[in-house]
Amino acid sequence: MSEHRLTALSPVDGRYAAKADPLRPIFSEFGLIRARVTVEIEWLIALAAEPAIVELAAFNDQQIAWLRALASDFSLTDAARVKDIERTTNHDVKAVEYVIKERLLAVPALSAAAEFVHFACTSEDINNLAYALMLVEGCTKVMWPVTTELLTKLRVMAHDMAELAMLARTHGQPASPTTLGKELANVLHRLAWQLAQMREIAIPGKINGAVGNYNAHVVAYPELDWHAFAQRFVESLGLDWNPYTTQIEPHDGIAELCDAQRRINTVLIDLCRDIWGYVALGYFSQTVRAGEVGSSTMPHKVNPIDFENAEGNLGIANALLGHFSEKLPISRWQRDLTDSTVLRALGTAFAHSLIALDALQRGLNKLHPNPSRMAADLDGSWEVLGEAVQTVMRRYGLPEPYEQLKALTRGVGISRDSLREFIAGLAIPRDAKERLLALTPARYTGLAADLARED
């Protein structure tokens, strides 16, 4: 088959490839190889800077710049060379080591350092740090900025629609009115909270050898405090240090990060379904795009497809993220290989999340509130003022206020006139009665408008 996107097995690399492009340099196999090269190079530089390792001369500034350029300038051609070697080694991390050695051996002044590439490391010393760097980059450069853009959009909408009264629905039935802006502010607050929690999650790393005990390190250089050296190195990469591991870093930090992204996605699924419902009720209309078809047979249709697309992609992402958080922290004894293939799918989960964020933002940009439709619903639901009336009755000690309003309103329609007639007969102070008589469903929104503007 050709490499055309129409033949892609995954929609992330086919139909939605352009939407996932920002994550491709980070979470692709190219991104993983590049991250491994970064870790290997930084480990070599750190070893050379340690006075106790006398056999490896410290690098000068020019040499350090050259070494770091191996990672920063890493190309698809370089990655292809790694894959060529892997066909022989059948080991991806060893192939990275060999490619770096090739480059060093080609420079006489650096050739003596070649055997210190991957010194005392197990593959997982490199892998865990590489994946940690990939996750940090993917979140800070792509996922969090895009999520923040969505927060900004929701904030603008919440403020603009702060006073736009609408009939609330609890259990799908008419309930005390709210405002469209307040309902969006609810989502804004939840999403901001979850994003803040996610930003605080530590992504740990380790570089302590085949079973986490620095066995080879200590045999080679017993006088060196490898525990402290490893901590300094991991933290120099901008990661948190995990001092206690088996051969693998146990992935608890990755599990926490995946759970946090999953919670963000769950909030967004809730938003998608609510907006879908508001469109169905006519509270929102959508911008009509020229040439777009809503149905192959019903020409009038303008479907909320962006919210449906977002919901579907968020569901796929959450299925993967849930598997990651449940599976990755579990490893048989000191190491099994099940995490290796699972970690390779991290990018797929974040890609589906990114695709959903794009669809959701696109859908929100198409929305236009329909005040007349919301006003009609409110004007047809005078029974929702029963809560207000019985609460005022309680204040002034009238007998069985809840029961009286229940008999008047529950399960039956009630008009403005019939409610006003009931209020007129109440033995309550005149000012209280006038407030109730002046009340309409559209005005019965409490502090909704203020709350919508606060966040």
Image (cartoon, helix red, strand yellow):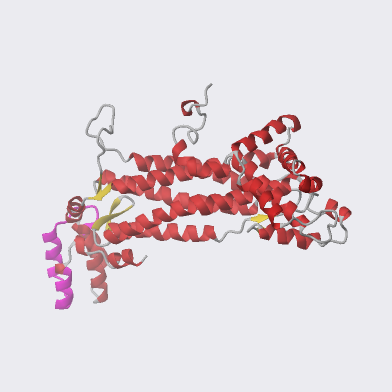
Total marks placed: 0
Residue drawn at (61%, 40%) of the image: 344
Q: State left or right for residue 53 relative to residue 74.
A: right
- Residue 101 falls in image quadrant: top right
Quarter of the picture containing the C terminus is bottom left
Tell me what residue is drawn at x 69 percent, y 54 percent: 62
Q: Nearer the viewer, residue 254 or 138?
A: 138
Q: Is residue 264 above or below residue 28?
A: below
Q: Position of residue 117 (x, y in %)?
A: 77, 47
Residue at image location 35% in from the left, 45% down from the top: 362
Query: Image quarter for residue 386?
Result: bottom left
Residues shaded magenta: 409-436
Q: Is residue 277 magenta?
A: no
Q: Is residue 333 visible?
A: no
Q: Is residue 319 left or right of residue 56?
A: left
Residue at image position (47%, 32%) is 14
Which is the main secondary structure of the residues drawn in magenta? helix
Q: Nearer the viewer, residue 435 or 344?
A: 344
| Magenta segment includes 432 | yes
| x then y, percent, for residue 430 | 14, 77
